[in-house]
Amino acid sequence: MKYSFQFLTVLFVNLTIAQSITIKDSTNRETIPYATISFGNGLGNFADEDGRFTFSKEKYSDVDTLFISAMGYAEKAVLTKALPETILLKPEVSQLNEVIVSAPKNGRFKLRKRKAFSHADIFTSWLPTVESEVAVLFQRYEGQPTQISKLLLPINAESKYKSKGKGKIATIFRVNFYENQNGLPGDPTAYANIVFPINEKEDRVFELDVSSKSIYIPENGIFVSLQVLGYANSKGRLAQTKQYREIKTARGVQKISTSFRPLLPFSNKLIGQNTYVRRIFFNNKKWQIFDKSYNEKSKLIQTGYRNYGMGAVFKVFENQ
């Protein structure tokens, strides 16, 4: 009986401890940072900078399959009942479109700016979740060869609504770049995605220096997106936390995605429609313009706050 009890105790502990899994490239065995782990039921998570994520069958008892993906790799389905310690993804280089650099590397240029639009009203701000991504189209400045030097990201840290000293957080964001396909974000470009933290001390506009990335805008423009990966832990690394809350309703337990801080203030001051959104664990990751066709009940859309006012500082080169 004594040994049986010890065996059951060990078995119970092993079942409840989260399993650590590493995602690697199948050809060179290098880790793949910030890969996407989709549960196939509209929920998901991300691996950290070392390609690691944790999965607990107790925490996600209703999940039987994980779908692992990353830019430049083929998606892979893995059964949760037999999760390996390492998951290998096969590269698909064709998924990343080549970027055509048409600006002179050492040519004469002038700095120009596209203003960012921000505010502190939480009721006209987007609540970012790990399932959502917001993209904005950037065109060349006055048709000239243009490099993006800085991204100006409107954020709302809710400082006017918080008590002093409360709400200390750090959220890890990712910027992605997509080609313009008939007015919608298309295939990802070969520009590396950029991962960075924003904490509660930042407010209004966060300046992200991307000058070292040599991001040149093609003739038909480029989409720049902002996406939340999750909260940072005490070491500044992506925390492996549950990304949704379970709420009891009349229809049973509903899983509601966690919203992260800071919020993204949307604007009603921009002419036209230049903002697109997608929920990466829903609707086959399809992009949609942020208007009534996306959600006619959205308060942001109903009140005219339909655009994310992302700005930028450009290096505008002389045509030669």
Image: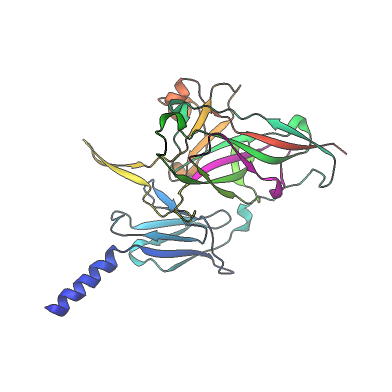
Q: How many marks?
A: 0
- Name the residue at 48% across, 45% down: 171
In the picture, residue 19 is in which quadrant?
Answer: bottom left
Front one among 229 and 61: 229
Magenta residue check for 213? yes
In the image, is residue 87 above or below residue 192?
Answer: below
Quick one: which residue is furthest to the right in this view?
A: 320
Of residues 24 and 123, the one drawn nearer to the viewer in this rendering: 123
Residue 320 falls inside the magenta stretch: no
Quarter of the figure with residue 249: top left
- Looking at the image, the residue that sits furthest to the front is 164
Task: Pinpoint residue 210: horizontal percent, then vertical percent.
Answer: 67, 45
Q: Which residues are magenta?
A: 200-228
Q: Residue at x 23, y 67 (%)?
A: 12
Which is nearer the eye, 138 or 82? Answer: 138
Q: Is residue 217 visible?
A: no
Quadrant in which the C terminus appears: top right
Query: What percent of the width, then of the height, locates residue 247?
Result: 27, 40
Image position, residue 296 (x, y; %): 43, 25
Apparent side of residue 125 relative to residue 57 in the rendered image (left or right):
right
Image quadrant occupied by the N terminus: bottom left
